[in-house]
Amino acid sequence: MNMYAFKVFLKTFTLSYCVSFTLYTITVWAVNGFDLNASNNGIYPRGENAVYILNEACTVNMLENRTNEDMIADFNYCLQMHKELNGAHK
């Protein structure tokens, strides 16, 4: 195989590999409904200071440097997530 043929082969192989990988990725996303957060296991963080755990708990960091408004907003986030994920409209 001469050098020209090798370069053509390498370009063709690289292009077909990239196209195959792209099509595979699109197919996997389509099968999973494009839900990139599907593997959250019921854990929904809100920044670095709050986490809602589906049907279990709401954890809010109550550090000295946090204002009451920030903590209330985090609690409200947990309540909103609970309502949305459980279909509650109370």
Image (cartoon, helix red, strand yellow):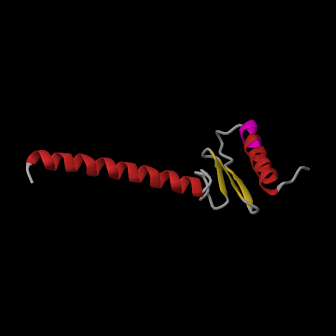
Q: Is residue 46 above or below residue 27?
A: above
Q: Residue at (21%, 49%) from the top-left corner?
A: 10
Q: Is 21 placed left or right of 12 in the picture?
A: right
Which one is nearer the viewer's eye here, 26 or 74? 26
The x and y percentages for residue 74 are: 72, 44
How many discs mark residues in the rendered view? Answer: 0
Instruction: Let me know if residue 69 is in the magenta part.
Output: yes
Instruction: Let me know if residue 51 is in the magenta part.
Output: no
The x and y percentages for residue 23 are: 45, 51
Q: Is residue 43 above or below residue 19?
A: below
Q: Residue at (77%, 54%) from the top-left corner?
A: 85
The x and y percentages for residue 90 are: 91, 50
Which one is nearer the viewer's eye here, 45 or 26? 26
Q: Based on the displayed image, in which of its 4 quarters is residue 56 positioned?
A: bottom right
Segment colored magenta: 68-72
Most common SS among magenta residues: helix
Q: Residue at (47%, 53%) from the top-left corner?
A: 25
Q: Is residue 70 above or below residue 1?
A: above
Which one is nearer the viewer's eye here, 77 or 25? 25
Q: Is 75 placed left or right of 48 in the picture?
A: right
Which residue is farthest right? Answer: 90
Which one is nearer the viewer's eye here, 86 or 1? 1
Q: Is 6 placed left or right of 16 in the picture?
A: left
Q: Quadrant of the N terminus?
A: bottom left
The x and y percentages for residue 17 are: 33, 52
